């Protein structure tokens, strides 16, 4: 066994060596030529300038605004959707967060919400996650942000509800039909990588300012995961099982309902989980078009640089996310168990407990409807003559404010040195090579690299994407963004491998680090931007760091799963053969999870690209700044839209190259396994 | 047998548990403050309650007020909202949105008023001149001063830095990793008017404009610069609450003269003083709402706004408390605003 894997390692390395040499040759040739032609044909466009395409897009935007009240498309289509979406959100708000039916408070008070959340977590998950839901929701109450948190929950539930309503059928269809899958994939790519800032302002023309636009913006970003993963679940149902059912005479629809859906249930629940996470990551952006909730608290407190209050609200978002994540994950595990059936004994006990739980919950919901104390979360309790404070929020705000102040006062000289080193040694040279080479040189070099790393199809995609980027008129900005993206991805992968290997090898490390990774992924980036600017100034490096914070968790989790998935017998065999820990990691565990590393790189890149716009808010410049400027100045709208398209194109380019590389790595490991 | 016992035992345990839970929660609620929702002790006002003495003004209806994302604007909104709600009995719907989205709101009928507009000639042209959905209500009394600023420690250490002619002398000091060997001039939120790139070129300054990308980045940069005594030259403006915390010092560019900024590419003079104005939707102007009269009369000074902005941003008062404090202290001014409502 170990001999076979050692052989795999050798073979793999020799393939990699050849490819590595070729990559090095291309890079050397590029740098050499760069010396002669630097600064020519760079297709630059100053930050306030626009081209013909951008102006035409501006005009289009203006005419939509001018004609929206007379155009039948609006009167009979968009307005109807707007009304429907508003009703849906308002209905959930009436239940959870806003005064309803002439009452000063929502229909279900905090006690009822906590009870329902706990019951549902227990019914669909298990006792452990039910306890987590109970503690999590109570904590949000103690933070003093119950009402905005419920607004956020209402909007999230509405968005997830619609996502599932549309997404699961589409996902099933895409799972069954190859042509539909091919048509849908680029559209989903577009929905996930197009920065929301680009279409947020025009969206308010279509669906007006308020919850409807917030809902639809959230939907655009949150819908793709459930479609993709449902399709994947249907596609991976083993052929053998399907054929068996067919040979027993099932029709196509019977096979779907009786075989495919039950077998894909676990995967579909993971899709729901990802959709919920995506919806929660839109909370702050939705606040920019007056969608209610915790995002409002974050955005408004940052107007006066109040990091403490913003952090408190961000923490509530993190808690909601972690509760929903753990509950849906537990639900997917249970879906697996349910699929295999269970003994009648446990079932009967469960039924009894279920009835009891439902009765208790119903009573608590009624109490929370009726009594003020159970309806709006109290900030203190008076029992007898003693007063018990129920306010954790103030302490959290104070602590995070003083932590921020300490960091920006005492760490500044160190962080400034780090920023300067990385910028002068990393960002500046890479960016100069990409953006000061003539476009044709950079173009040719990227296509050649795509050819070597990913093959002919990847090279063809590169030609197409780069040509379209030239057509957007934002070549130089795109190259600057590409440079920052590549550098951020390198940092993400360094962290991914270091922390991922650690977590993959130690269960305890995994238990401690994983919640932190979840927090980094869902904490609104706006919250930590202020301290980051204090530490690293308004600079491209700050943009890179923000992207790393968001993207590294994904890469780390994927690497950790890959390492943990390496067969223990192989590791044992290597250890028996006298390998030390370092050798086991570098010679066995990493080479055997090469496919996972490629996947982590791919996801790292996509997540880094998702932060380009955020980087633009803190000095990242380039495409991110263009998008931000387009959102705030109507004369730059067209340029912002073009920049958004350029980001999508960069995303497709990098995604296809890394995916092709991953497939190759997979093929080479599989051949020798 | 075993199976039967365990299930019946489970069921009775659950039942007992639920009875206890219900009893305990009932007792807690009844015992301590069992106030009913919507009952008399309710803190929130009745929806549409007109029982108080101000019932004569019921024609206001809903007033849709845009709240753009900076604290000064929030101060305007706080005071107007307070008066519209408490004196005119309006239902005020405050919408937290950016400037461009606010203007779009005029055409969709969702925004009645913007009460602190900084320039935006392109939007004026589209919404006031071309589609007539909005009207200019003139000055709100605030004077917007845009310019280049340095942190106060620099003005003390290098007194002559406030004259643009000396900027090149100090350019090296302002070098950063972002400015490509030149001095850095930091710009902020792209929604604000700027001629900075042209100014640097036309005044032959050895500086490069670096895009900070947001007001947050700009303020934080100034705060750090003052705290750590680091050099910084950046675009900034008044009125702004942050000037109460760190009194930035303005660098004097060649004085503004009428028309010196007419050719955007050739600009070589300072920014003009902006008269910040109020814009309302035509529909709102014709509605006869008392809130319209309030917006029309609304007129205060940079100092007034700074006081309220400080209550909100520095003293962390709620918008309503900040507004009440200022309104109670300035009855004369408030009365002129309420005239004709």
Image: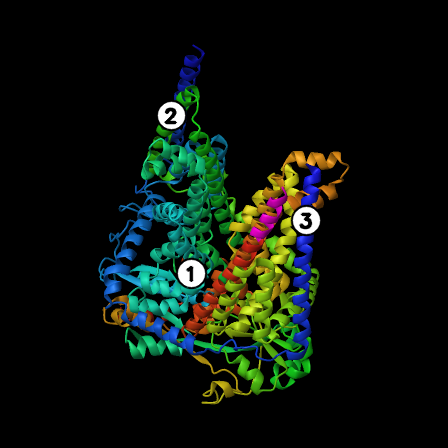
Q: Please tell me the numbered disc located at residue A11.
A: 3
| Percent position of residue A142, x then y | 48, 42
Q: Please tell me the numbered disc located at residue A356.
A: 2
Q: Residues within 10 Å of mark 3 (few under 14, many from 20)?
A: some
Subunit of mark 3?
A: A
In the image, taking residue B266 as reference, residue B232 lies left or right, namely right
Between marks 2 and 3 in the image, the one whose residue lies nearer the viewer:
3
Q: How is the model colour-coded?
A: rainbow
Residue drawn at point x = 37 percent, y = 67 percent? B102
In the image, taking residue A180 as reference, residue B173 lies left or right, namely right
Q: Residues within 10 Å of mark 1 (few under 14, many from 20)?
A: many
The residue range painted magenta reads A662-673
Subunit of mark 2?
A: A
Residue situated in front as seen by the camera: B224 or A643: A643
Q: In the figure, residue A218 lies in which quadrant?
A: bottom left
In the image, taking residue A29 as reference, residue B62 lies left or right, namely left
Residue drawn at point x = 38 percent, y = 37 percent? A112
In the current view of this chain or complex, which residue is farthest to the front?
Answer: A247
**Of pointers 1 and 2, the one earlier in the residue sequence:** 1
Q: Mark 1–mark 2 contact, CB under 8 Å?
A: no
| Percent position of residue B122, x then y | 38, 78
Residue situated in front as seen by the camera: A8 or A505: A8
């Amino acid at each position: 066994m170990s001999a076979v894997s050692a052989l795999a390692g050798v073979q793999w390395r020799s393939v990699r060596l050849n490819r590595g040499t070729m990559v090095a040759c291309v890079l050397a040739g590029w740098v050499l030529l760069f010396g002669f032609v630097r600064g020519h044909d760079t297709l630059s466009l100053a930050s306030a300038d626009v081209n013909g395409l951008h102006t035409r897009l501006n005009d289009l935007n203006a005419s939509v605004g001018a004609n929206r009240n007379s155009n039948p498309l609006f009167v009979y289509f968009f307005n109807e959707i707007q009304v429907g979406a508003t009703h849906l959100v308002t209905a959930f708000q009436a239940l959870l967060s806003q005064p309803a039916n002439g009452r000063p408070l929502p229909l279900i008070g905090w006690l009822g919400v906590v009870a329902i959340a706990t019951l549902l977590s227990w019914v669909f998950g298990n006792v452990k996650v039910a306890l987590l839901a109970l503690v999590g929701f109570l904590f949000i109450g103690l933070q003093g942000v119950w009402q905005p948190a419920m607004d956020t929950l209402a909007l999230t539930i509405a968005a997830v509800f619609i996502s599932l309503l549309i997404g699961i059928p589409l996902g099933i269809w895409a799972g069954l039909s190859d042509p539909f899958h091919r048509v849908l994939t680029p559209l989903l790519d577009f929905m996930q990588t197009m920065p929301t800032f680009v279409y947020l302002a025009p969206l308010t023309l279509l669906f007006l300012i308020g919850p409807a636009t917030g809902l639809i913006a959230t939907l655009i970003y949150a819908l793709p995961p459930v479609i993709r993963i449902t399709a994947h679940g249907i596609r991976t149902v083993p052929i053998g099982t399907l054929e068996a059912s067919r040979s027993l005479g099932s029709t196509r629809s019977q096979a779907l309902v009786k075989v495919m859906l039950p077998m894909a249930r676990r995967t579909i629940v993971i899709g729901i989980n990802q959709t919920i996470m995506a919806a929660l990551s839109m909370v702050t952006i939705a606040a920019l078009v007056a969608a209610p909730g915790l995002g409002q608290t974050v955005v408004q407190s940052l107007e006066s640089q109040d990091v403490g209050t913003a952090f408190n609200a961000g923490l509530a978002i993190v808690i909601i996310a972690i509760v929903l994540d753990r509950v849906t994950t537990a639900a997917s595990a249970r879906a697996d168990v349910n699929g295999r059936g269970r003994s009648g004994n446990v079932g009967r006990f469960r039924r009894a407990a279920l009835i009891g739980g439902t009765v208790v919950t119903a009573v608590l919901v009624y109490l929370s409807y009726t009594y003020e104390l159970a309806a709006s979360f109290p900030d203190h309790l008076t029992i007898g003559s003693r007063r018990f404070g129920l306010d954790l929020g103030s302490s959290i705000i104070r602590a995070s404010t003083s932590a921020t102040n300490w960091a920006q006062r005492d760490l500044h000289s160190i962080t400034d040195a780090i920023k300067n080193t990385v910028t002068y040694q990393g960002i500046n040279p890479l960016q100069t090579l990409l953006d000061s080479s003539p476009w044709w040189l950079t173009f040719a070099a990227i296509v050649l690299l795509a050819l070597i790393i990913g093959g002919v199809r990847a090279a063809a995609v590169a030609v197409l994407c780069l040509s379209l980027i030239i057509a957007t008129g934002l070549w130089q900005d795109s190259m600057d963004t590409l440079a920052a993206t590549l550098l951020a991805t390198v940092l993400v992968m360094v962290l991914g491998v270091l922390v991922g290997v650690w977590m993959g090898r130690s269960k305890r490390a995994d238990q401690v680090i994983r919640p932190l990774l979840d927090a980094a992924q869902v904490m609104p980036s706006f919250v930590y931007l202020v301290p980051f600017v204090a530490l690293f100034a308004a600079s491209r490096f700050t943009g890179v760091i923000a992207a790393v914070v968001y993207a590294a968790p994904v890469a780390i989790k994927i690497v950790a799963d890959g390492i943990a998935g390496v067969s223990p017998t192989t590791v044992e065999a290597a250890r028996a053969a006298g390998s030390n820990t370092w050798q086991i990691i570098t010679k066995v565990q990493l080479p055997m999870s090469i496919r996972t590393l490629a996947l982590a790189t791919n996801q790292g890149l996509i997540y880094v690209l998702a932060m380009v716009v955020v980087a633009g808010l803190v000095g990242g410049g380039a495409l991110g700044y263009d998008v931000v400027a387009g959102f705030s100045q109507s004369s730059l709208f067209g340029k912002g839209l073009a920049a958004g398209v350029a980001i999508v194109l960069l995303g497709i380019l990098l995604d296809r190259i890394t995916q092709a590389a991953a497939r190759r790595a997979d093929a080479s490991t599989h051949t020798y396994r | 047998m075993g199976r039967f016992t365990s299930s019946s035992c489970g069921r009775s345990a659950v039942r007992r548990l639920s009875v206890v839970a219900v009893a305990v929660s009932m007792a807690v609620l009844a015992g301590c403050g069992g106030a009913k929702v919507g009952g008399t002790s309710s803190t929130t006002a009745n929806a549409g309650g007109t029982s108080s003495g101000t019932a004569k003004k019921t024609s206001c209806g809903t007033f849709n007020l845009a709240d753009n994302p900076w604290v000064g604007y929030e101060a305007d909104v706080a005071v107007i909202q307070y008066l519209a709600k408490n004196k005119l009995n309006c239902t005020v719907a405050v919408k937290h949105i950016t400037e461009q989205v606010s203007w779009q709101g005029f055409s969709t009928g969702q925004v009645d008023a913007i009460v602190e507009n900084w320039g935006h000639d392109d939007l004026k042209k589209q919404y006031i001149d071309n589609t007539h959905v909005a009207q200019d209500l003139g000055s709100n009394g605030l004077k917007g001063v845009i310019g280049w600023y340095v942190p106060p420690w620099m003005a003390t250490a290098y007194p002559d830095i406030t004259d643009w002619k000396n900027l090149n002398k100090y350019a090296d000091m302002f070098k950063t990793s972002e400015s490509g060997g030149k001095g850095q001039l930091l710009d902020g939120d792209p929604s604000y008017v700027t001629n900075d790139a042209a100014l640097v070129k036309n005044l032959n300054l050895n500086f490069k404009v670096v895009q900070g990308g947001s007001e947050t980045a700009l303020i934080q940069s100034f705060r750090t610069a003052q705290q750590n005594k680091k050099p910084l030259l950046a675009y900034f403006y008044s009125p702004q609450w942050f000037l109460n915390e760190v009194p930035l010092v303005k660098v004097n560019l060649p004085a503004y003269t009428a028309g010196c900024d007419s050719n955007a590419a050739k600009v070589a003079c300072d920014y003009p003083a902006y008269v910040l104005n109020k814009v309302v939707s035509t529909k709102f102007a014709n509605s006869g709402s008392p809130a319209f009269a309030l917006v029309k009369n609304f007129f205060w000074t940079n100092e007034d706004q700074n006081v309220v902005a400080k209550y909100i941003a520095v003293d962390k008062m709620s918008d309503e408390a900040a507004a009440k404090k200022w309104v109670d202290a300035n009855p004369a001014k408030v009365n002129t605003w309420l005239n004709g409502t």
